[in-house]
Amino acid sequence: MGAHIIIAWRAKPAVAIQSDGLLRRGAPRNDRQHGFTFIEVMVALAIFAFAGIVLASAYANVLTAQKAILERNALAADCRLVRQMLFAEPDLKKLSQWNDLPLPDGRSVRWRATVTPTTLPDLFDVALEIEGLGENRQSSQTIRENLRLLRPTWSNKSERALLLAVAAQRIVRHPQP
C-alpha cells in the first residue's frame, strides 16, 4: 500500500506525519515565505482605509446633528424668553415696534408683535415675529407665532366697556337653562 502523508501547518517548518507513525521534518522554507506578499498588504491597507473613511464620515454626521440640535435648543430658549417679555409688557404701543434683546452668548434677537382685539373683552390675538441673529451675525432665522392672550392692561377702557355691555345683553337674551 502507498504511504499517506498528512501535513500539519505551524509557525515552524512543516512536519510530515507518515503512515508508519514516524515524524519527519519537511524541507526548511525560504525566508521570503514567512511574511505577507505585497498584494496582501495592499488589500489589508485598502480595507482599513475604507473602514476609516466610513467611520470618519459617520463621526462628521454625528457632529453636524449635534450642532443642529444645539442651535434648535438655543432658538427654542430664545423664543421662550421673547414670549416672557411679551407677557410681561404692559404697554401695548411698545409691542408694535421692533424690540432688541441681547443674549449673553453674543447673539441677539429682535421681536415685535401685532396685537388685534377680539370680540371678547381683554382677549387679544397676537402675531409674534422673532428674528434671531446667529453667532456669526450673518445668518438669520425668522419665526412667526400666533397667540391668543387675555390681557386686561392692553384694553382700551371705552372699548372694554362696550364689549362687556354687548356680552351682558347676550347673556340676558339667551339665559342658560
Image (spheres, helix red, strand yellow):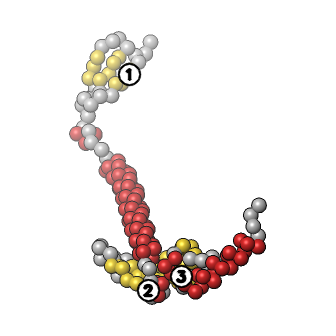
Residue 30 lies in quadrant: top left
- Whole-number angstrom distance, CA of label 2 to CA of label 3: 14 Å
Q: Residue at x 54, y 85 (%)?
A: 156
Side (left or right) of 127 relative to 10: right
Quarter of the picture holding the C terminus: bottom right
Which sits in the foreground, 122 or 9?
122
Res. 142 visible in picture: no
- Whole-number angstrom distance, CA of label 2 to CA of label 1: 97 Å
Residue 89's place in the image compared with 2, above or below, is: below
Q: Amino acid at mark 2?
A: Lys
Q: Provide the secondary structure element on which disc 1 rests.
A: strand
Please tell me the numbered disc located at residue 94. Answer: 2
Q: Residue at x 29, y 73 (%)?
A: 104
Q: Provide the secondary structure element on which disc 3 rests.
A: loop
Residues packed near mark 2 inside 10 Å, few (<14), some (14 to 19) or many (20 plus): few
- Image coordinates of residue 19 in percent, x first then y, are 37, 14
- Image coordinates of residue 70 in percent, x first then y, are 38, 65
Which sits in the foreground, 42 or 22?
42
Q: Amino acid at mark 3?
A: Ser
- Whole-number angstrom distance, CA of label 3 to CA of label 1: 102 Å
Side (left or right) of 148 relative to 6: right
Closer to the observer: label 2 or label 1? 2
Pick whichever of labels 2 and 1 is earlier in the sequence.
Answer: 1
Provide the residue designation for mark 3.
155
Pick whichever of labels 3 and 1 is earlier in the sequence.
Answer: 1
Q: Amino acid at mark 1?
A: Ile
Please tell me the numbered disc located at residue 6. Answer: 1
Residue 45's place in the image compared with 133, above or below, is: above
Q: Residue at x 73, y 72 (%)?
A: 172
Closer to the observer: label 3 or label 1? 3
